[in-house]
Image (spheres, rainbow, N blue to C red):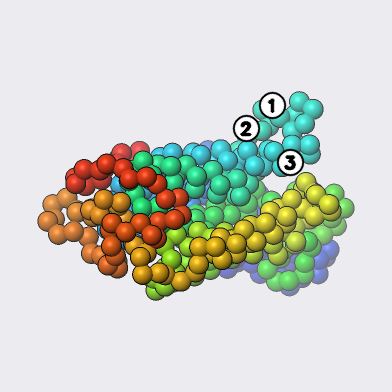
């Protein structure tokens, strides 16, 4: 959908911008009965879940664990993302009785990724803990797929003609219809496609995290602070390009402050935990040391890397007390 539009972006942008070409925007955010913003988010979630299942199975975990985690973590992430948006934009959009029913119209846009990350990861770790999963191991399996989901979800901003930046005459400038241009920018035809910049940044981050994980030189669990720091590093410069009205603190957009805090927090976590793998660190998927065996196959899933299943030294990210677990393969609900 977006890629064919990019390939066809040789249309004139009009006399206001004076550009050679541009990226067209859809005239509507619907495709028949479908709200494309919601559909893109759903496709991103599905992609993240399926890639996570493959990665978790490669580590010796039951892929249905990912369904069990996603069953609660995905709704929690959506609620957290919407709450973040409503809270940070309350005075501007929802105060004085304007919140009903506008605060619930998710299909019109308005999901704050920081809130979604915080709520989704927290609930996901809680579910994993109850299933006696080693938390650093499952984090390393799932975390790289988060920017993949975000990248796909960002296509929804293209359909909504939102989250664009300052006017630009660059060939990849995004055409915005007059009704969607901010006040004071009505005379400009094309703008920086900041949603596209973030999409490409997230895809690059996904590839980088997968590559880093493949080499297994970092301590288990360190992909999470790497992801947080990498995401907010991109958000820092992308946010600075945006011109839409946003809540500000001391003259800076609230998401710029959060980006600074996120980058700093990630660096602190890496400094405290240490970056490189230690002798006692383990990649075993479960705390009792068992590995999932495929039904219909008597051989266990291949070890990604040998480790001491009884040594918990590498489990200091969300370490939990010992949980009694049977030797049966871990189960989980079927996908719905």
Q: Quadrant of residue 69?
A: top left
Q: Secondary structure at mark 3?
A: loop
Image quarter (top left, top right, bottom left or bottom right) of the C terminus: top left
Q: Secondary structure at mark 2?
A: helix
- Dot 1 corresponds to which residue? 100
Q: Quadrant of residue 142?
A: bottom left
Q: Secondary structure at mark 1?
A: loop
- Dot 2 corresponds to which residue? 104
Q: Earlier in the sequence, mark 3 or mark 2?
A: 3
Measure the C-alpha gap from mark 3 to mark 2. 14 Å
Q: Earlier in the sequence, mark 1 or mark 3?
A: 3
Q: Nearer the viewer, residue 189 or 301?
A: 301
Q: Is residue 29 above or below residue 136?
A: above
Q: Residue at x 28, y 62 (%)?
A: 308
Residue 141 shows in the view? no
Q: Nearer the viewer, residue 118 or 238?
A: 118
- Dot 3 corresponds to which residue? 89
Q: Residue at x 74, y 33 (%)?
A: 94
Image marks 1 and 2: residues in contact by CB distance under 8 Å = yes
Image marks 3 and 2: residues in contact by CB distance under 8 Å = no
Q: Nearer the viewer, residue 27 or 255?
A: 255
Q: Residue at x 49, y 39 (%)?
A: 75
Residue 205: percent from the left, percent from the top? 53, 66
Q: Residue at x 56, y 47 (%)?
A: 118
Image marks 1 and 3: residues in contact by CB distance under 8 Å = no
Give neighbour class at mark 1: few <14, some 14-19, many 20+ (Cα, 10 Å): few
Q: Is residue 310 left or right of residue 246?
A: left
Residue 275: percent from the left, percent from the top? 49, 69
Residue 81: percent from the left, percent from the top? 59, 43
Residue 122: percent from the left, percent from the top? 50, 45
């Amino acid at each position: 959908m977006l890629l064919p539009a990019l390939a066809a972006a040789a249309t004139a942008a009009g006399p206001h911008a004076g550009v050679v070409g541009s990226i067209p925007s859809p005239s509507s955010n619907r495709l028949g009965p479908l709200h494309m913003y919601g559909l893109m988010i759903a496709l991103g979630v599905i992609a993240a879940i399926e890639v996570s299942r493959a990665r978790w199975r490669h580590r010796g975990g039951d892929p249905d664990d990912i369904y069990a985690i996603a069953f609660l973590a995905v709704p929690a992430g959506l609620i957290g993302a919407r709450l973040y948006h409503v809270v940070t934009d309350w005075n501007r959009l929802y105060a004085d009785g304007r919140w009903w029913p506008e605060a619930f119209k998710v299909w019109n846009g308005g999901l704050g990724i920081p809130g979604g990350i915080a709520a989704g990861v927290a609930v996901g770790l809680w579910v994993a803990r109850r299933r006696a999963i080693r938390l650093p191991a499952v984090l390393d399996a799932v975390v790289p797929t988060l920017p993949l989901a975000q990248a796909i979800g960002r296509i929804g901003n293209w359909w909504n003609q939102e989250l664009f930046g300052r006017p630009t005459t660059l060939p990849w400038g995004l055409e915005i219809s007059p009704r969607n241009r901010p006040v004071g920018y009505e005379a400009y035809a094309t703008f920086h496609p900041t949603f596209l910049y973030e999409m490409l940044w997230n895809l690059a981050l996904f590839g980088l995290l997968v590559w880093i994980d493949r080499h297994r030189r970092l301590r288990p669990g360190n992909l999470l602070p790497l992801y947080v720091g990498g995401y907010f590093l991109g958000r820092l410069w992308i946010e600075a390009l945006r011109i839409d009205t946003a809540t500000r603190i001391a003259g800076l957009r609230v998401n710029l402050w959060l980006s600074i805090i996120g980058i700093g927090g990630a660096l602190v976590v890496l400094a405290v935990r240490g970056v490189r793998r230690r002798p006692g660190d383990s990649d075993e998927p479960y705390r009792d040391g068992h590995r999932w065996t495929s039904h219909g196959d008597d051989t266990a899933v291949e070890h990604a890397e040998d480790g001491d299943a009884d040594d918990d030294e590498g489990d200091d990210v969300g370490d939990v007390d010992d949980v009694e677990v049977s030797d049966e393969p871990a189960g989980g609900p079927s996908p719905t």
